[in-house]
Structures are given as C-alpha cells and as structure tokens.
Amino acid sequence: MRRSKKKRRIFKNNKLRIIKAKKRALKEEKLPEEEEGVNPLVKKYWRQRYDLFRRYDEGIRLDEEGWFSVTPEEIAVRHALRCAGSGAGVVIDCFAGVGGNAIQFARVCNHVIAIDIDPKKIVLAMNNAKIYGVQDRIDFIVGDFFQLAPSLKGDVVFLSPPWGGPSYKTIKKFSLDLLKPKDGHSLFQVAQAITPNIIMFLPRNVDLLEVDQLSWLSSPPLDIEIEGNVVRGNLKGITVYFGDIAITQPCFPQILSS
Ligand SMILES: C[S@@+](CC[C@H](N)C(=O)[O-])C[C@H]1O[C@@H](n2cnc3c(N)ncnc32)[C@H](O)[C@@H]1O
C-alpha cells in the first residue's frame, strides 16, 4: 500500500532530523585527553582519523605535522595498487612521514625504502607499520632524500614532499616552486636519476601546466598521467604518474569514494 502524503512528509522530516543530529554529534565529538591541547587545526583532521588510517583505533600514532600531511588511506591504497599493477618490486618513499603511503606500498609490493629527515616521523611510521603487520617489508631510513638519492635503487620513486602546511589551500595556483624543501623541478630531476617511473602526490590547486612541463625534462618526454583524488566528495590532491606507470588514457577526476 502507498504511504499517504502526510506520512511521507513525516518520514522525510524524521530522516532529515537524524542526519542533522548525526552531523552535530560529529562536530561536537571531543578529542581524547592525550590529544587535547594540540593545535586546534589537528581537531579537524582527528575527525577524519578513519579516512587517514582505517585501523586508527589499534594504536596508530601521529604528530602535529603528520595529522595534516598524511595521505588518506584510500588514496595511498590506490598509489600502491598502481605500483603493484606495474610490477614494481621496490618502491622508494622519499618523504615517508608517519607511513601513510609506505604501509600501503608494503602491503602489495615486495619491498619499500621509507625515508624521512625527521627521526620522530620514522619512529611513528615504524609503530604504524607494525599495526598493519608490514614492518618487515620496509627499510626505514632517517636522512635527507637529496643526500641519499645517488645511492638509491628502486623500480618506482614516490614523492610526497611537504606542501608548506595547510595554508597551501589559500593559494589560487600552487606553483611547483612552493614545494619544500626544494622546488618541484629540482626534486623531479633528482628522482629521475634513480628511475623514470615516478609518482608525485601534489596539492589539488597545483599548476597543471608546470606539472606537464616536468615530463619534458626527459628526452624523449616521459609518459604522464594526471589523476584527481577525491575522498567523500572532496578533492584531496592530485597524483601524477610518470614513465611506465602512467596510463595515457585520460582518467581525471578519479572518484575514489562517494
Ligand atoms: C607530506 S609529508 C609525507 C606524508 C606521507 N606520505 C604519509 O602519508 O605519511 C612530508 C614529509 O617529508 C619530510 N621531509 C622534509 N624534508 C625532507 C628531506 N629533505 N628528506 C626526507 N624527508 C623530508 C617531512 O619530515 C615530512 O614528514
């Protein structure tokens, strides 16, 4: 039997009320005691903790920079599957942070070299890798990628350098010159000396013309693929694949979750 118009309206109103209450509860959700007193910015990221690490509750640890710079798990899984799909055995994660990417690479590739200049990040990344049971497949190195680069060997180089903190969002067109600790062109050239198979994870507002020019630094130019990474309807970043891992059919934007 069909519901009367009045009943349908009541049902719709109740549903709306429940959604609003859920949203309010999420907003009012409190940081656990040990996380209180931290930068209020972190609060926003803490609410997204399960998007960052699905196994957050099992003992995942992050520091302040880690909270706003870790790659959301869904995107890291995608990066990793692309590497595995291309047959990459060894992946070098040159800016490993708290391990968001390195962990997912280790789940599907043979071996990962995870480098970070900050020793505290490496301690956190090791803890987090243990939770995912992949610590044995990762070599953790404390060091400066630019100094280590000439001695590194791998099938894919993964670059997620610092974007200069959350203020990158206020820039209209993010130039590769703004990447830290060195500009994107210098970074790309250093990476290219290791392998032409490079993945870069960049801000959503990155200048795509500059990104395209990177492929021309090589002769002949490298294949390039640009992908938008969306999580829960929000564009979180841009992934650029170079070399053998690039699929040259356009697939932008890549919807990762609804
Ligand atoms: C955007 S975060 C990486 C986040 C990482 N992909 C994740 O999912 O956890 C960038 C990292 O680069 C590190 N870093 C900065 N300069 C570096 C350098 N010269 N060599 C290696 N790591 C560096 C920072 O300490 C920071 O942890």
Image (cartoon, grey):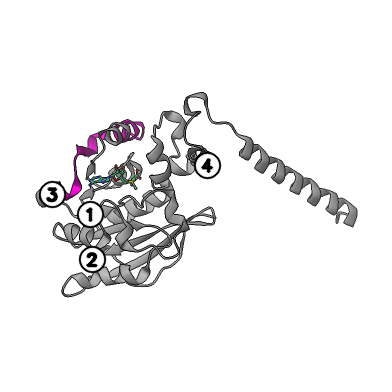
The residue that label 3 is drawn on is 152
What SS does tag 1 mark? strand
Asked if the residue at tag 1 contacts the one at tag 3, i.e. Cβ–Cβ closer than 8 Å, the answer is yes
Mark 3 or 1, nearer chain start: 3
Say how many tags the image has.
4
Nearest to the eye among marks 2 and 3: give it. 3
What SS does tag 3 mark? loop
Most extreme residue toward the left is: 151
Residue type marked 4:
Lys
Q: Position of residue 155 (x, y in %)?
A: 18, 55
Q: In the rendered structure, which segment of residues is drawn in magenta?
A: 125-148
Left or right relative to 150: residue 3 = right
Quarter of the image for residue 244 reads: bottom left
The residue sitting at 44% across, 35% down in the picture is: 55
Mark 3 or 4, nearer chain start: 4
Q: Label 2 vs label 3: CA separation?
A: 18 Å
Q: Position of residue 101 (x, y in %)?
A: 33, 46
Quarter of the image for residue 119 reads: top left
Residue type marked 2:
Gly
The residue sitting at 23% across, 41% down in the picture is: 117
The residue that label 1 is drawn on is 157
Left or right relative to 247: residue 43 = right
Residue 176 forms part of the magenta stretch? no
Mark 2 or 1, nearer chain start: 1
In the picture, the disc for residue 44 is 4
In the picture, the disc for residue 243 is 2
Q: Position of residue 190 (x, y in %)?
A: 17, 57
Q: Label 2 vs label 4: CA separation?
A: 36 Å
The residue sitting at 35% across, 64% down in the picture is: 175
What SS does tag 2 mark? helix
